[in-house]
Amino acid sequence: MSRTPESDLAAGLNEIERTANLDPTDWDAFRQAAHQMLDDTIDHIANVRQKPVWQPMPSQIRARFAHPLPQDPRALDDVLSDIRDNIFPYATGNLHPLFMGWVHGAGTPVGMVAEMVAAGLNMNCGGRDHVGIEVEKQITRWMSEALGYPEAASGLFVTGSSMANFLAVIIARTEALGENVRRDGLGAVDRQLVAYTSAQAHICIAQAMELSGIGSANLRSIAVDDAGRMNMDALRAAIAEDRARGLQPFLVVGTAGTVNTGAVDPLAEIAGIAEAEKVWFHVDGAIGALGMLAPTLRELFSGIERSASVALDFHKWGHVPYDAGFLLVRDSAAHKRAFAQPAAYLQRSERGLAAGDTWPCDLGPDLSRGFRALKTWMTIETLGAERMGNAIAHTCEIARYLAASLKRDQRFEIKAPVALNIVCFGIRGANDHVIRELVLDLHESGLAVPSWTTVDGELAVRCAIVNHRTTKADIDGFVKVLTERLG
Ligand SMILES: *Cc1c(COP(=O)(O)O)cnc(C)c1O
């Protein structure tokens, strides 16, 4: 037989196909290794209490992750043992009941299984007509129900509340200036937009103003009361002053659970002011919005149902594995006006996989995106909203218990009211340096991980009780460790 260009191509393909397919050659061996890894991960979660909360990474572990790009394959078993030895022991620590630093969710075993399934299905949830889109819509409906929003509200998974808050600023801006601002930019308008948030708001609100091009100098930082809540008289005065100067107030951001102390702004009063002033009312509910699942906490967030949009994090109090931020928008048309694009390759059809009216890519800047909705759906579906709400309420009780325990010892002083689940305390006679060293020593001891923050200009130890695993006994142990360290 003579060689032809076609026969050469076929022979070449036969050669390449031996390795182009990236599936395992031995599925049984793969299955066994994967099952073992699943067991090891379950063991890691189940036994987390027996391990240090966190431990420093030795230099040889860091060096392990500074290797050159590997050209050759390596046995899966070998790679998995690398994970057991070099990754498991040096994780963040937020699964542990005495991890109280910043605001980290603890995850759940069920959420982990969902992540595995989501990766297996590997859906692209940017759009098109498949079940991933329906699951995301289910979460939108559930959140509308939980927060008292209309059924027609729209929702979108994003990485976290930093992103959700940013998208809310973009929507509010587009509604204030009209859709043309998308094409013409801010330079084409002769009005200066101004936004308002409290002095205790998360820094990502200022960053969102920067990213939007409006600028953080046009975000007014409104004073707070003794409980860390936005002062309504100061808000009204700031809006009036800006209007008198010919500026255009367009957005008020209220916080449901400040990152420093857990304070909740008077959301109903902000709603009233926003309605009267005809400005967009957005709630940064990164920490607090899911508190709406707890009947004992719901009253605190009264007024959230009157907002125009809410940012929230399932990966914090909801314990959905990272990352699972979410944006809920009352007016789905406004949401779409800010982001939908007319690209030819995104054209919709009446039937087939290209069907569907609104796709997630119409509601935010991401096109390709993963199936974050599944881990959220599976967590809520398996545990139920009531149990999740109880776990959230329990962390607030544990926080009050910690504050009460500290109050019994003259050496400690509570620095801010415990509104939700965050306790900030100082040590009498200790300066900032001593507090910092104490916190870092605790980290390195592996016994507990609090963080610190500044309250009224002074450094305070900050314990955010987010973890559903944290018990009264854990807190007793923590207070004992603290008092022992003070000598
Ligand atoms: C955590 C937090 C954010 C940022 O959310 P990410 O999910 O970390 O992006 C914003 N606001 C508040 C109040 C937060 O606690």
Image (cartoon, rainbow, N blue to C red):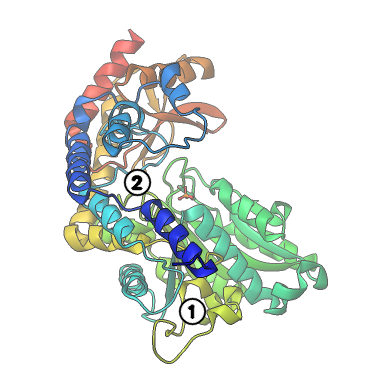
**Label 1 CB-ligand 1 distance < 8 A:** no
- 480 shown above or below 356: above
- Give whichever of 197, 52 is nearer the camera: 52
- 470 shown above or below 270: above
Q: Alpha-carbon neighbours of circle 2 within 10 Å: few (<14), some, or many (≥20)? A: many
What residue does disc 2 label? 420
Tell me if I can see residue 295 in this picture. Answer: no
* Relative horizontal placement of residue 245, taking residue 240 as reference (left or right): right
Count of all numbered marks drawn on residues in the image: 2
At horizontal 32% and vertical 34% (from top left) the residue drawn is: 79
Mark 2, secondary structure of its residue? loop
- Give whichever of 305, 277 is nearer the camera: 305
Tell me if I can see residue 91 in this picture. Answer: yes
Where is residue 250 drawn, in percent x and y?
65, 68
The residue type indicated by label 1 comes to: Ser
* Relative horizontal placement of residue 198, taking residue 140 as reference (left or right): right
Name, please, the residue furthest toward the front. Answer: 1
| Image quarter of residue 84 | top left
- 302 shown above or below 16: below
At horizontal 27% and vertical 60% (from top left) the residue drawn is: 293
The residue type indicated by label 2 comes to: Leu
Quadrant containing the N terminus is bottom left
Q: Which mark is residue 332?
A: 1
Where is residue 438 drawn, in percent x and y?
42, 17
Where is residue 311 drawn, in percent x and y?
46, 60
Mark 1, secondary structure of its residue? helix
| Image quarter of residue 379 | bottom left
